[in-house]
Image (cartoon, rainbow, N blue to C red):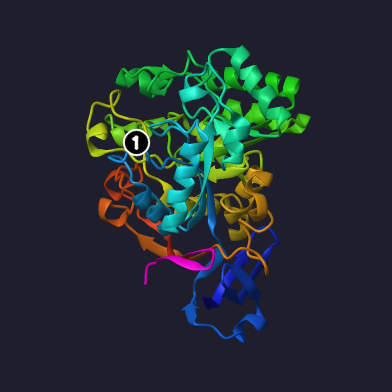
Amino acid sequence: MRLTIHGGRVIDPASGRDELADVAIAGDRIVAIGPKAASLAAERRIDASGLVVAPGLVDLAARLREPGQEHEGMLESELQAAAAGGVTSLVCQPDTDPVLDEPGLVEMLKFRARKLSRCRVFPLGALTRTLQGQVLTEMVELSESGCVGFAQVDAPIADTQVLLRALQYAATHRLGVWLRPQDAWLGKGVAASGAVATRLGLSGVPVAAETIALHTLFELVRATGARLHLCRLSSAAGVALVRAAKAEGLPITADASINSLHLVDADIGYFDADLRLTPPLRQVADREALRAALADGTLDALVSDHNPVAEDMKNLPFAEAEAGASGIELLLPLALRWGQEQGLALARTLARVTCEPVRVLGDALGSLASSAGRLVEGGVADVCVFDPDAAWDVTPATLCSQGKHTPFALASSGVPMRGRVVTTLVAGTIAWDRR
């Protein structure tokens, strides 16, 4: 199909483009941006007057729940939620059932996602068999089947020898390892250590659970040269260690979640299970450090940490409730909120959810590496058209995700969202249209 997006504010954070312009698309590629686009014949014309035309968002942390956990999220519903949130590429976690530790499972997931044509899915493979932290997976075979990196999700490897061998294997074959820094023994609580956890009688997770893990990981990266992505940092002390490691030149990147960027432990209130999250929400100083680190580039990307949870697993006492929240539809408005509060230009804000996540993925994207997360002539036509000023209420009815629990729901936060996706294109095909 040939289509034209007419009259929008075109922003490409990677190149600095920010202008009123038309965008012409033919097939799965952008063929023209600017005056030439208006003259090309098109089968469909999308009016973007008063709207922003940006690259499709790239989310580095989402759980799709299929296979094996369809009661919490079907692949169809979660990819629909991604398209509704303007996300055209996402990295999914390997903790499905069965775990993504065999090439056939990865190929099946990618095939199902391609058939739905709602969003590009890039799976992470399990770093160890069944995520048990004992036996390494065949990472090369998993990479050849489509895995863009290897992770343990929320199951840290307690045996440092196994972790060393995993990083040696990954470094030998130039594969990326994605780990959330958490000590296996200190990280077993349900809330961040501090006054709130003490007052509520909840088991705490100290900041040391993150910093001890970071020190260990950095020593192993120095020894192996492995490329490491640090997932969902949560503390000011952790940010300081990452900043020093980057200054040293270690091959690391890092992200933070929308939850840690906007919420603190005090928001738990009277045991609100929607705030039962991993990593746990920390104090105001930690939140502010994460916000500043995302702005100055110490943290490379902002992620949704999308983790749909079934109703019966949230309607439990706080410590027994399943950790997680739906977030992929909120990634854009919460990124915009952060950017506005930090006083950042719109292009700089969008970079943290478009071109910078692509840089984290690097060569793992293959042929898409040069144009994903960008709006460039000849590049892939993954596009997000959104209204930055549209206010809307987050309610179960307004979420496409099968998981309806989020700490940003109007009933919990009392604050409407601002910024909403109007149209999403994936490879030149309309995956979502709100009009």
Where residue 201 appears, as percent x and y from the top left, is 31, 17
Please state which of residues 238 and 325 is positioned toward the viewer in this rendering.
Answer: 325
Q: Tell me the kind of residue under disc 1.
A: Gly
User: In the image, is 112 to the left or to the right of 300?
Assistant: left
User: In the image, is 355 to the left or to the right of 389?
Assistant: right
Q: Is residue 401 above or below residue 50?
A: above
Q: Is residue 92 visible?
A: no
Please state which of residues 430 and 206 is positioned toward the viewer in this rendering.
Answer: 430
> Would you identify the image quadrant in which residue 371 lies?
bottom right
Where residue 100 appears, as percent x and y from the top left, is 47, 33
Task: Give SS at disc 1.
Answer: loop
Q: Could you tell me which residue is drawn at 65 percent across and 64 percent down?
A: 379
How many discs appear? Answer: 1
> Would you identify the image quadrant in which residue 398 lies?
bottom left
Where residue 162 appears, as percent x and y from the top left, is 60, 16
- Range of magenta residues: 425-435
The residue labelled by disc 1 is 68
Q: Is residue 237 above or below residue 68?
A: above
Where residue 279 appears, as percent x and y from the top left, is 45, 29
Residue 387 colored magenta?
A: no
Q: Could you tell me which residue is drawn at 34 percent across and 51 percent down?
A: 77
Quadrant in the picture for the C terminus: bottom left
**Within 10 Å of the Cα at label 1, are there few (<14), some (14-19), or many (20+) other Cα atoms?**
some
Q: Could you tell me which residue is drawn at 66 percent across and 34 percent down?
A: 175
Q: Is residue 163 visible?
A: yes
Q: Could you tell me which residue is drawn at 43 percent across and 53 percent down?
A: 82
Residue 432 colored magenta?
A: yes
> Would you identify the image quadrant in which residue 354 lies?
bottom right
